[in-house]
Image: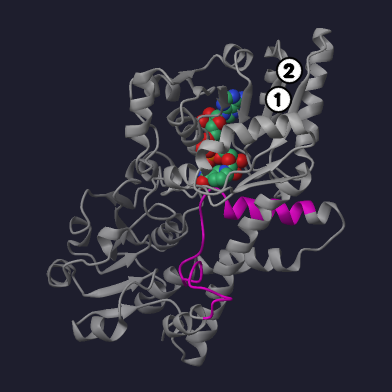
Amino acid sequence: MKISVIGTGYVGLVSGVCFAQMGNKVTCVDIDAAKIAKLEQGIIPIYEPGLEDMTLENYKQGTLKFTTDANDAIASSLISFIAVGTPMGEDGSADLQYVLAVAKKIGQSINDYIVVVDKSTVPVGTAEKVRAAIQAELDARGVDIKFDVVSNPEFLKEGAAIKDFMHPDRVVIGADNEKALEVMRELYAPFMKHHDRFIAMDIKSAEMTKYAANAMLATKISFMNEMSQICERVGADINKVRNGIGSDSRIGYSFIYPGCGYGGSCFPKDVQALAKTAKDFGYTPRILDAVEEVNYAQKYVISNKVIGRFGEDLSGKTFAVWGLSFKPETDDMREASAITIINELTCKGAQVVAYDPKARHEAENHYLKGNQSVSYVDSKYDALKDADAVILVTEWQEFRSPDFDEMKKLLKTPIFFDGRNQFDKVKMQKMGFEYFQIGVN
Ligand SMILES: NC(=O)c1ccc[n+]([C@@H]2O[C@H](COP(=O)([O-])OP(=O)(O)OC[C@H]3O[C@@H](n4cnc5c(N)ncnc54)[C@H](O)[C@@H]3O)[C@@H](O)[C@H]2O)c1
């Protein structure tokens, strides 16, 4: 099948590459000319395990192309995916300007039947807006060309995106006619040879499914973080509580880790966008509002522990920060807890020496750019030299089993703030660390 994917970010690039891998002819389009130029030179703009090899392989074979020319790419495809960003607007709603700009472009470009697929996370009712934007352009051109709009929300996880896309738990398609549904079934059939995971539904329910999934996951995290706050106050240990409740099959162990708050490009904005939609329709979403409120507060828990230990004035203190990305196996720093923690500490006079296996360039050039109190190093041990304490923010695998003796030698004082509860408190204390966790006294 001939496919165009408009928007070559985390979702667009992964989707395009995976469709190409299954033998489709894919053109990935972006307005960011520098990004497209890099991709054409074989430079992958994001870190995602497995993505580079698969991209290069398909590019060499000619199944995958990159361009800034949306017209050509759209005009020659049977399916066009909209995979641009839907960032949070000022009032918390999803900003649809990029999605609708692509819809307009599609209306200007098509000469034949096309299935337009909303893959971006968009509020209920967006497919109708996309349809209207395309139709308005066709009317302006004075042409009668048939097209369908379907919703196909994406559930991939950054850090495991290729695996998730190639072996999806489910493919949700919202469609209002059989023809478009059949095209989508055919496209996704190679991804579900093992057993059928194609879930067809109406368009609004598909749009809502994505928000409901992210809201549920964010709720689990905030719930557990709230439990951790109660544990600290009553003298219970959240790690033991987690084991105790996770063993209940109705609850399960996933997404109930206490931590320093969720970040990323999805949960924060999607929870708020869903809350805004609910309010627009006259409903007060009490759970969603609380989920966000708990998460906001949780991002300050670690910095408050540091301040509790070292005092309000942190001038003259240096802290090593391990991990900057919002989660391991990605360089994505959107809404990362590290941003809040580092800004909070440096605001109080501290110096920070940060190390992350992949996200250094994002921090330096974007998210912490201009913060003169932060410096960066290329190894986790280099960050520790003469630091007053180490703060673990992102649970990359290389932090799981560090050389504790080496750490003690390098740190000025062996103080460890663990934002991801990676270690056993008693063992850490026996080794001579002053060790702080979340949800444990
Ligand atoms: N990142 C994730 O893990 C994830 C997972 C599921 C769903 N989503 C959703 O997918 C959508 C895309 O997210 P992302 O993380 O890939 O975003 P991203 O910011 O990484 O990529 C978006 C890309 O779209 C490009 N773009 C913007 N306007 C364009 C236009 N008119 N024509 C062509 N390209 C244009 C941008 O230059 C950018 O490269 C969002 O709605 C997001 O909520 C993201």
Crowd tier of the residue under label 2, counting other residues whose Cα lies within 10 Å: few below 14, some 14–19, many 20 or above: many
**Screen quadrant of the N terminus:** top right
Task: Name the dominant secondary structure of the magenta segment.
Answer: loop
Q: Mark 1 points at which residue?
A: 103
Question: Which residue is at a point 81% across and 56% down the rendered structure image?
Answer: 279
**Screen quadrant of the C terminus:** bottom left
- Secondary structure of the residue carrying tag 2 is helix
Q: Which mark is residue 107?
A: 2
Question: Which residue is at a point 49% across and 50% down the rendered structure image?
Answer: 157
Location of residue 106 by image quarter: top right
Residue 105 % position (x, y): 68, 18
Measured Cα–Cα span from mark 2 to mark 1? 6 Å
Amino acid type, residue under disc 1 in the picture: Ala
Q: Does the magenta stretch include residue 297?
A: no
On whether ligand 1 comes within 8 Å of the CB at mark 2, the answer is no
Kindly check if marks 2 and 1 are in contact, taking CB atoms under 8 A apart as contact.
Answer: yes
Crowd tier of the residue under label 1, counting other residues whose Cα lies within 10 Å: few below 14, some 14–19, many 20 or above: many
Q: What residue span does the magenta drawing correspond to?
A: 248-277
Question: Which residue is at a point 37% across and 37% down the rendered structure image?
Answer: 51
Q: Is residue 263 magenta?
A: yes
Location of residue 346 by image quarter: bottom left
Residue 112 vertical position relative to residue 208 in the rendered view, above or below: above
Q: In this view, does 406 lie to the left or right of 346?
A: left
In the rendered image, the residue lying farthest to the right is: 282
Residue 47 % position (x, y): 37, 41
- Residue 183 visible from this viewpoint: yes
- Residue 96 visible from this viewpoint: no
Residue 279 vertical position relative to residue 99 in the rendered view, above or below: below
Residue toward you, 195 or 302:
195
Amino acid type, residue under disc 2 in the picture: Gly
Residue 243 % position (x, y): 44, 81
Question: Which residue is at a point 38% across and 25% down the rendered structure image?
Answer: 58
